[in-house]
Image (cartoon, grey):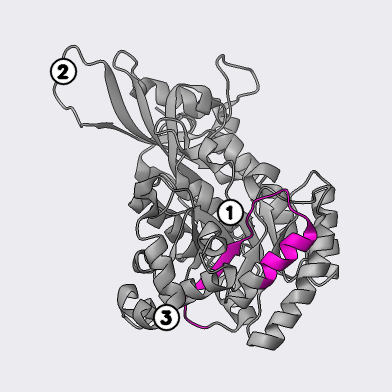
Amino acid sequence: MEMQEILGLPIALPDGVDYDDYIIGTYIVSYPAALPVPLIAPMLAVEQSTGTWLPVPGETPEVRCQHIAKVIGVYEMPDYEYTVPPNLQNRQWFVQVAYPEVNIGEQIPMLLTTVVGNISMGGDIKVVDIRLPKKYVDGFKGPKFGIEGVRNILGVEKRPLLNNMIKPCTGYTCEVGAELFRKAAAGGCDIVKDDELIADASFNSVLERVKCYMEIEKQVYEETGEHTLYTANVTDKIPNVFENAKRAVELGCNALMINYLAVGFPVMQALADDPAINVPILAHMDVAGALYMSPYHGMSSHLVLGKLPRLAGADVVVIPAPYGKAPVIDYKFKNAAKNLSFPLYNLKPTFPMASGGITPSMVPQVMAALSNDIVIGSGGGIHAHPQGPIAGGKAFRQAIDATMQGIPVSEYAKENEELAVALKEWTDPFSKGIRI
């Protein structure tokens, strides 16, 4: 077989492709035993690159050599060698496909179109990882501030940051929200964010909140000496999302929030890349479960919650933690955080924000899992504190301080009333079916 013919095949050795020029998609495939995945996989590679289900004249040898995707690995689990057990109903496969980066370009929509694409409708196929070459990642600016930048704004060098989501989630007036914001900030919350369920509402506009909350932020800073980032939720239809964001920044808002999967990665990336949006962006994860929760379809959570929003410029990303109400496997939580904060070429690290029913008693677990470069998020765990939101914020800060000093929170609570009350109230809330 001539070299051009070999290069035009939808298969290659894993050592036979230049990893600087290819994006590698890794899949878990679960198919009935009768379907020959080693034969089907190259057909899927063609489907996601140069061809279709029938040969077409334009798919020339030259086109295939430059643009065809290549299956570089098909491995069965378990790895049968000499025979397949009779009466086997299903077989599990680990498949890797190399996609020419030139087909995709430095953008997320065509990445998803190619690597997830039509084959997501081809049965039990799940994308479990995407390996990106440097030339692809170099096309993204990534987080404008990242972990270090957010810390510099707040003047907090080492400890975890504390975030509060204003509760109730929606339905309240600006006046009610302002009082809740004041109390959360006064209690020591470094970040106070809108809930994902309230944006530019008819009963409580985002710009009204910005004007009111930022005046309170100044007042609390004068009282406590600590700044608070208010992440105003600018999620909306286009072009409103951009107009809301720019107007909010003009009015003095010091951070923004966006439901990044609801609006799409390119919308968040456009905000992050805009020089006029000179404030950190907090990315909320709603809709994420529709993409990653199935064990057989979609994409793994570390892509949806970690690598992709970091590429698109998020400075903080909310991720579900396994210690509260979220149904999350511990190592999946850690893997999402790793994809946000570990080295990724020249991109700045993004803050993972552990969230989902977090109470002060869980702080040591969260910090042990992810170290100090995290944001700890709590809504009800602050606002539902028996002594009120100020005490709720103080209880979290006390739990953080205790853990930083290596003191058990139960011991630290003996001299800190707010923490003691919180521990008594929520020692193990989810064993009692309580939603926080």
In this view, the residue in front, 326 or 235, is 326
Mark 3 or mark 1: which is in front? Answer: 3
Q: Earlier in the sequence, mark 2 or mark 3?
A: 2
Residue at the extreme left: 82
- The location of residue 199, given as percent across then percent down, is 75, 51
- Mark 1: which secondary structure? helix
Q: Is residue 370 magenta?
A: no
Using the rendered image of the protein, determine whether residue 276 is visible from the camera's viewpoint.
no
User: Which residue does the numbered mark 2 point to in the structure image?
Assistant: 85
Of the 4 image quadrants, the one containing the N terminus is top left
Residue positioned 54% across, 56% down in the render: 318
Using the rendered image of the protein, determine whether residue 170 is visible from the camera's viewpoint.
yes
For the image shown, how many numbered marks are present on the structure? Answer: 3
User: Which residue does the numbered mark 1 point to in the structure image?
Assistant: 309
In the image, residue 332 sits, relative to residue 256, either above or below, namely above
In the image, residue 219 sits, relative to residue 423, either above or below, namely below
- The location of residue 424, given as percent across then percent down, is 37, 65
Amino acid type at image mark 1: Pro
| Classed neighbour count for the residue bearing mark 3: other residues with Cα under 10 Å, few (<14), some (14–19), many (≥20) | some
Q: CA distance from mark 3 to mark 1?
A: 38 Å
- Mark 2: which secondary structure? loop
| Classed neighbour count for the residue bearing mark 2: other residues with Cα under 10 Å, few (<14), some (14–19), many (≥20) | few
Amino acid type at image mark 2: Pro
Q: Which residues are magenta?
A: 157-182
Which of the 4 quarters of the picture holds residue 104? top right
Q: Is residue 173 magenta?
A: yes
Residue positioned 82% across, 55% down in the render: 205
User: Which residue does the numbered mark 3 point to in the structure image?
Assistant: 416
Q: Are marks 3 and 1 in contact (CB under 8 Å)?
A: no
- Mark 3: which secondary structure? loop
Q: Left or right of 100: which side holds 214?
A: right
